[in-house]
Image: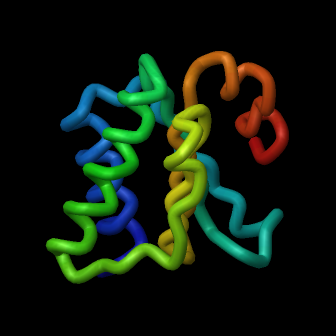
Amino acid sequence: MQHEQLKQFVIDKIEDLKGRDIVDLDVSDKSSITDTMLVCSGNSKRHVVSIAEKVVTEAKLAGITPLSIEGQDSGEWVLVDFGEIILHVMQDETRDFYQLEKLWG
């Protein structure tokens, strides 16, 4: 799957589960580990974990295997690493605290 197709695929799955405030950050000139960071918010720990699980499940069904998944235990911030795209699903408080958009934007 091409980069733009994968990015839209992930965004579609986030939207399917009502993930909020999706931000698409091009970090290709700032990072050697990824080209794009997608950041979104969930309403609760359960919602954050559900969004990440939906993306991972649908990706696997489409033949795309994430390199790693971190943070499912806490549900504050779940990171799904697809290599060229890294997805951050966060609760609002965690997102406000870490401010990834300012750090990488």
Residue 66 lies, in percent from the top left, at: 43, 74
| Left or right: residue 78 compared with residue 101 | left
What residue is drawn where x is 46% and y is 33%?
22
In-front residue for pair 28/74: 74
Quadrant containing the N terminus is: bottom left
In-front residue for pair 62/54: 54
What residue is drawn where x is 67% and y is 17%?
93
Q: Is residue 57 above or below residue 48?
A: below
Residue 94 lies, in percent from the top left, at: 69, 26
**Which colour assignment does the render follow?**
rainbow
Q: Quadrant of residue 100?
A: top right
What residue is drawn where x is 78% and y is 77%?
32
Quadrant containing the C terminus is: top right
Tally of numbered discs: 0
Q: Is residue 54 above or below residue 84?
A: above
In-front residue for pair 18/37: 18
Residue projecting furthest to the left: 61
Q: Quadrant of residue 26?
A: bottom right
| Left or right: residue 27 compared with residue 71 | right
In-front residue for pair 99/5: 99
Residue 92 lies, in percent from the top left, at: 59, 19
Q: Is residue 103 above or below residue 66?
A: above
Residue 58 lies, in percent from the top left, at: 20, 62
